[in-house]
Image (cartoon, helix red, strand yellow):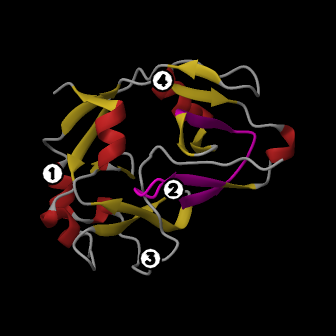
């Protein structure tokens, strides 16, 4: 059974045709300085979560995001283990394609409080806030953007990295959030 996934991250970030070497944001002093005075956000929408099914263990798990044109595109891939939770945004990205991604169980508990108890999706409200900085032209240059609109950041779950977008956000936990995702699902609290 094939499961369609999309990232939280989250965030309209595709690497499929992107050739830049991913940049580890933690190695860029100017970006780390920006995180000294970040904006604080809380997710206002629920996240669905479930345990992986036994047939999924060991399988590649694709994450899909909106392509901004009514369709979808591959963001990243990750491998399913018994130590992850399958997370999903409640609304489809396009057609029957959902934004799904994998979260390690310990990170899920820190973020949502309790673990899902079955392989069927359950509703969870995020309890943890995120620190984020807006991706502007200056940040894109620091990330070696080749087109002034996108850049590729290093992420722990995919050696190809994650594409981030101008006017999106960098979160302190090594991922990007697309502008549309931020607007629809997060609220600024500080």
Q: Which residue is mark 1?
A: 34
- Give residue 79's position: percent from left, percent from top: 69, 54
Mark identifier at residue 71:
2
Q: Nearer the viewer, mark 3 or mark 1?
A: 3
Residues 44 and 160: in front is 44
The span picked out in magenta is 62-90
Q: Earlier in the sequence, mark 1 or mark 4?
A: 1
Q: CA distance from mark 2 to mark 3?
A: 18 Å
Q: Which residue is mark 3?
A: 18
Pick the residue in front: 26 or 141. 141
The mark that comes first in sequence, 2 or 1, is 1
Residue 118 picture location, percent across and down = 76, 22
First-in-chain label (3 vs 1): 3
Q: Give the quadrant of residue 27.
A: bottom left
For label 1, count other residues whose C-alpha is less than 10 Å away and answer few (under 14), some (14-19) or many (20+): some
Left or right: residue 78 versus residue 22 is: right
């Amino acid at each position: 059974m094939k499961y369609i996934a999309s990232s939280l991250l989250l965030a309209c970030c595709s690497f499929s045709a992107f050739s830049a070497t991913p940049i580890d944001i933690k190695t860029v002093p100017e970006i780390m300085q920006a995180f000294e005075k970040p904006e604080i956000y809380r997710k206002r929408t629920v996240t669905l979560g479930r345990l992986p099914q036994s047939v999924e263990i060991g399988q590649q798990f694709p994450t899909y995001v909106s392509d901004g044109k009514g369709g979808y595109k591959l963001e990243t891939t990750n491998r399913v283990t018994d130590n992850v939770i399958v997370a999903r945004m409640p609304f489809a990205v396009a057609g029957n394609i959902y934004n799904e991604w994998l979260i390690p169980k310990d990170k899920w508990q820190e973020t949502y409080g309790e673990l899902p108890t079955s392989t069927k999706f359950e509703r969870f409200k995020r309890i943890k806030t995120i620190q984020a900085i807006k991706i502007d032209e200056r940040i894109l240059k620091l990330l070696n953007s080749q087109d002034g609109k996108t850049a590729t950041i290093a992420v722990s779950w995919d050696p190809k990295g994650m594409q981030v977008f101008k006017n999106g956000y960098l979160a302190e936990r090594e991922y990007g959030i697309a502008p549309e995702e931020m607007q629809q699902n997060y609220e600024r609290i500080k």
